[in-house]
Image (spheres, helix red, strand yellow):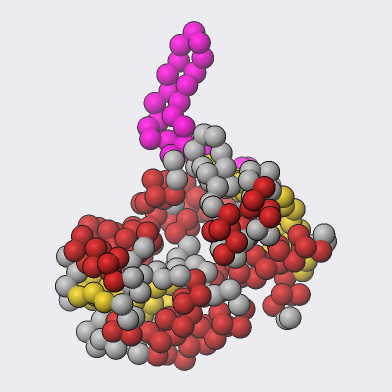
Amino acid sequence: MKKLNIGIVGAGRIGKVHAASITYHIPGAQIVRVTDVYEPAAKALAEAYGVPAYGTDYMDIVNDPTIDAVLVCSPTPTHADISIAAMKAGKHVFCEKPVDLTIEKIKLTAQVAAETGRKLQIGFNRRFDHNHGKVQKLAADGTLGNIELIKITSRDPEPPSPEYAASSGGLYIDMMIHDFDMAMFLAGCDVKEVYAMGTSLVDPRIGEAGDVDTAIVTLTFENGALGVIDNSRRTAYGYDQRVEVFGSLGMAAGENDGDSTVRVSTAAGVVSDKPQHFFLERYMASFVEEMKQFIAAINEDKDVPVGIHAGLMSVVLAKAAKKSLDEHRPVKITEILEA
């Protein structure tokens, strides 16, 4: 089978992650061009992974007739425009989250995907994690009975700079967006109402920048189940990533991954490894798996595993959470979708 030719737009941290996944784990695809507005970054990625062409203009990828698919790994404000241009040029697209910060632009991206018939996958890699994925399968196959409660904990090892917080779109869109998607993935349906609380306990400068660093959101799902997500920008013990689904017939919980499963038991107590430090350590295998499934969707002409609806609803929930925080009240999802 002919290898798929891939172009990567954006040579930052996530672009490098996907470049490594394709180069080392996906023999059916190859990267043929990378672009970044900062040319030294594009050059460095190209040299590291044997990519034959690099530059600063993403339209070089869009207009290259030999390229089959584009990975959009650039800053958020560019995601939708690049995705739209690539699909109109006949290319399949893998777009990192969020697709855009506006509902209108995400809906336009969805429209272009439908009109062109191109594959469009959104980068919610945590769906492909071995722990979270198993919990979801148990919830979906009826093992747990009717789903009643979902709990998600996501806590970073250290906070971002106040400057980053001020420009990131806020915790709900920058960090909790993964958890909104995970909640719907585990529930098997969308959310109909959100109630958010948040404050800044980690770094007061984040609060001064207009964001929160400590947050809880409660969710009411369309199937009647309830959910709660807690986020913190800092832990003293590593990257805390846990999920739990409780149903009428039982409960399934996904715990943290450490560097090993060894537990040392002595008279002083029982000790095991801390959670892995951050997302590159914790979720690297999930990045590989999501890219494998994107390539398979193209080669086998099947639906992508994470489509544009997930990209839309995660942003809708983030906006609903911010509105709830600002107005101190529950917010129905229809208030955002129909605004």
Q: Is residue 71 above or below residue 238?
A: below
Residue 186 sits in quarter: bottom right
Q: Is residue 260 left or right of residue 162?
A: left
Please name the residue shown 43% across and 23% down the image. Answer: 263
> Can you say whether 113 is above or below 171 in the image?
below
Left or right placement of residue 287 versus residue 33 in this view: right
Q: Bounds of the magenta span?
A: 249-276
* Residue found at x 37% / y 51%: 284
Residue occupying the far top of the picture = 267
Question: Residue 323: in sight, yes or no?
Answer: yes
Q: Is residue 324 magenta?
A: no
- Name the one closer to the observer, 143 or 105: 105
Q: Position of residue 30 (x, y in %)?
A: 21, 70
Query: Residue 202 location, x and y as percent?
Result: 63, 43
Q: Is residue 296 visible?
A: no
Residue 329 picture quarter = bottom right
What residue is shown at x 19% (from left), y 64% (from top)?
47
Which percent across, then down, holds residue 12? 36, 63
Does residue 198 appear to the left or right of 21 in the view shown? right
Residue drawn at 31 percent across, 77 percent down: 56
| Residue 216 pos. (x, y %) | 70, 50
Q: Is residue 254 magenta?
A: yes
Closer to the camera in the image, 9 or 147? 9
Quarter of the figure with the N terminus? bottom left
What count of labels does the image hold?
A: 0
